[in-house]
Image (cartoon, rainbow, N blue to C red):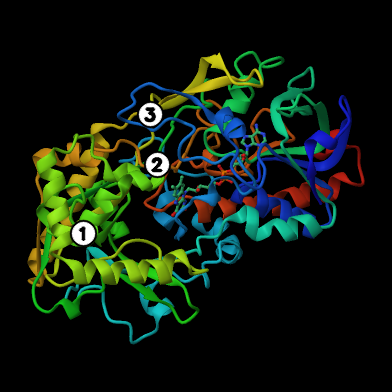
């Protein structure tokens, strides 16, 4: 059932087996899973079906360095389905190496392995509507699939990796009917969790406080609470709940909000593949199960270990859009239309330089002198993207010249100084806003540099391509737009040591026996992969954990269930 929080009587206290805060992909995956298992679940969602400015403003906050990180009310959506309302749908699992303790990646090492998560990935893939859980080109596209670059064969570089694309599925609208009909599930819209109240000994959650923007207040008492409010908001809720734990819940060792990671990303260098354009698969391919897929390059795990590299991938990409030197009408058209594109997708079309009239003129000339491609692109975009149910994932240009840049997407090395804290201002509900101080380190840039060097060496050795980039300007290129937006990772990290982590291998806050976290906040490291598929898989694993714990609890008093 989906209903309005304002319909709950002021001062009421609702009961449930599990209360989930937040209805993004993490919350919805868990809510549906627990309801299928027969539990009574309440899911609190701050927003409604559509974006609402007053609700969205609850996400506002401050950023320490505005060049490095977008304002916190951007790249997040406070509504049913959360940020999946605007996500790009790129799916791929983490790699086994991501879970390892790697000496060259400080603070690395998960308390679970890839194999612990593997059973949950296929269902996560299905929920994301990304088809089969198959991320190897040969397996996913069939044995006759052409290689990424014909003739490029390297022991050090993997070219068989693949990413698959969700519709992109907006979880709110796609699963609204299932949420409405799910047995034992109550979704409350407009329900803002404003505080987590602990029992006096601080070892269990007693209740959650809920407030609506219209002023209705009530509380929830549940055996188990799960915070699925997103990678930034979960930390905010923990830090802001200070009545019993003065430093915030789970924060006795000052870890909540620290180790905040995004991804290190940018377009780099010049790749020239020799021979025919037919030899290169740089765009989207459709798998037999109808999913858009895209190839990628990565350094093999053994080489990553040997060279001390963080994990990263490279995709074959087009030149920087803002620079009219590309002489491409489609790219120039995008540049000229950038103000019509949403902040999140338009940001990388503004490189910080104010374009001169001459730059505008050159972009206009590109459009005027490239009418065939520009018209073909528009027709394709309208039919395969705007009007299609399963959308063509992004702009891809016809490959005529076999010249590309490499689009890098790399793991960010965790560091304690990169953090979110509570700021001095409060939102409309009286909750302290967030202060975001995202930092990267020279090691992040150096790792991408050495990854690019491996790729350049291997292209040269193979003789099928050459790659060069400007090492001196690499940092500027990767940091041109600051942190890669939308991936909010690590603010309540998972680990065994209570002094350096917030949750344990079960995603339970160490010090609070009935409080759990679902979402990328718990990732101790960020991988090369976009986070959503893995956070859904972790939610499903959490569903299994809770079912085991609550199953036992039913026969016994709740307090004993978690001892
Ligand atoms: C432009 C963009 C593109 C992206 N593309 C990709 C991609 O291609 N691939 C990928 O893997 N990821 C992508 N992402 C990231 C992806 O959207 C997130 O990883 C995902 O949405 C996180 O899911 P979540 O459920 O943890 O959090 P969210 O989706 O953020 O949901 C959190 C929910 O909690 C609710 N909430 C917050 N606070 C409270 C409160 N106090 N009380 C009640 N409810 C609350 C919010 O309203 C929201 O509904 C992209 C993000 C952006 C912005």
Q: Quadrant of the C terminus?
A: top right
Residue 124 percent across, percent down from the top left = 58, 61
User: Which residue is at 22% across, 63% downward?
Assistant: 156
Residues packed near mark 2 inside 10 Å, few (<14), some (14 to 19) or many (20 plus): some
Residue annotated with mark 3 = 438
Residue 115 in view (yes/no): yes
Asked if residue 327 lies left or right of residue 511, the reply is left
Residue annotated with mark 1 = 318
Query: Tag 1, which secondary structure?
Result: loop
Q: In this orientation, which residue lies closer to the viewer: 421 or 543? A: 421
> Which mark is first along the chain, 1 or 3?
1
Residue 264 in view (yes/no): no
Marker disc for residue 343: 2
- Numbered disc in front, either 3 or 1: 1
Q: Are marks 3 and 1 in contact (CB under 8 Å)?
A: no
Residue 16 percent across, percent down from the top left = 85, 41
Asked if residue 245 lies left or right of residue 394, the reply is right
Quarter holding ligand 1: top right
Q: Could you tell me how far apart the alpha carbons at marks 3 and 2 are, in whole angstroms?
A: 19 Å
Q: Are marks 1 and 2 in contact (CB under 8 Å)?
A: no
> Which mark is first along the chain, 2 or 3?
2
**Of all residues shown, which one is farthest toward the bottom?**
144
Q: In this orientation, which residue lies closer to the viewer: 455 or 361? A: 361
Instruction: Answer above or below: position of 62 versus 2.
Output: above
Q: In this orientation, which residue lies closer to the viewer: 513 or 314? A: 314
User: Which residue is at 55% across, 30% downward?
Assistant: 59
Asked if residue 465 lies left or right of residue 178, the reply is left
Asked if residue 396 lies left or right of residue 11, the reply is left
Instruction: Answer above or below: position of 183 versus 248.
Output: below
């Amino acid at each position: 059932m989906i209903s309005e929080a304002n319909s709950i009587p002021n001062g009421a206290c609702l009961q449930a087996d599990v209360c989930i805060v937040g209805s993004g992909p993490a919350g919805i995956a868990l809510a549906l899973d627990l309801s299928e298992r027969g539990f009574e679940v309440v899911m609190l969602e701050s927003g409604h079906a559509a974006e609402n400015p007053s609700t969205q403003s609850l996400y506002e906050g401050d950023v320490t360095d505005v060049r490095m990180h977008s304002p916190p009310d951007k790249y997040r959506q406070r509504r049913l389905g959360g940020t999946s309302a605007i996500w790009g749908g790129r799916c791929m699992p983490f790699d086994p190496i991501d879970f390892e303790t790697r000496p060259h990646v400080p603070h690395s090492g998960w308390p679970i392995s890839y194999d612990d998560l593997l059973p949950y990935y296929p269902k996560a893939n299905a929920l994301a509507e990304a088809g089969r859980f198959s991320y190897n080109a040969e397996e996913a596209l069939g044995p006759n699939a052409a290689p990424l670059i014909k003739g490029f064969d390297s022991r050090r570089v993997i070219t068989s990796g693949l990413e698959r694309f969700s519709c992109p599925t907006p979880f709110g609208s796609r699963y609204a009917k299932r949420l409405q009909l799910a047995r034992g599930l109550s979704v409350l819209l407009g329900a803002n969790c404003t505080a987590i109240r602990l029992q006096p000994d601080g070892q269990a959650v007693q209740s959650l406080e809920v407030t609506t923007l219209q002023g209705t207040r009530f509380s929830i008492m549940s055996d188990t609470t799960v915070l699925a409010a997103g990678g930034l908001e979960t930390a905010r809720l923990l830090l802001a709940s200070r009545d019993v734990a003065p430093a915030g819940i789970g924060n006795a060792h000052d870890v909540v909000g620290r180790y905040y990671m995004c991804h290190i990303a940018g377009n780099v260098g010049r790749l020239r593949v020799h021979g025919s354009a037919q030899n290169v698969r740089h765009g989207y391919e459709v798998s037999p199960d109808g999913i858009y897929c895209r190839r990628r390059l990565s350094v093999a795990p053994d080489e990553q270990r040997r060279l001390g590299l963080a994990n990263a991938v490279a995709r074959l990409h087009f030149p920087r859009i803002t620079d009219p030197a590309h002489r491409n009408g489609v790219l120039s058209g995008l540049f000229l239309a950038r103000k019509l594109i949403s902040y999140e997708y338009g940001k990388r079309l503004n490189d910080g330089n104010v374009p001169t009239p001459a730059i505008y003129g050159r972009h206009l000339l590109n459009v005027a002198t490239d009418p065939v491609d520009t018209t073909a692109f528009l027709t394709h975009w309208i039919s395969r993207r705007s009007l299609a149910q399963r959308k063509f994932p992004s702009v891809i240009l016809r490959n005529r010249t076999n010249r590309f840049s490499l689009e890098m997407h790399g793991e960010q090395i965790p560091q304690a100084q990169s953090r979110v804290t509570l700021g001095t201002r409060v939102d409309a509900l009286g909750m302290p806003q967030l202060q975001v101080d995202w930092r990267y380190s020279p090691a992040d840039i150096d790792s991408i540099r050495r990854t690019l060097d491996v790729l350049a060496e291997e292209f040269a050795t193979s003789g099928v391509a050459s790659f060069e980039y400007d090492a001196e300007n690499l940092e500027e290129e990767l940091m041109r737009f600051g942190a890669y937006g939308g991936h909010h990772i690590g603010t309540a990290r998972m680990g065994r040591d209570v002094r350096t982590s917030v949750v344990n291998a079960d995603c339970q806050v160490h010090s609070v026996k009935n409080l759990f976290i679902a979402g990328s906040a718990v990732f101790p490291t960020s991988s090369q992969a976009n986070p959503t598929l893995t956070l859904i898989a972790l939610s499903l694993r959490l569903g299994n954990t809770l079912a085991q714990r609550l199953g036992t609890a039913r026969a016994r008093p709740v307090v004993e269930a978690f001892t």
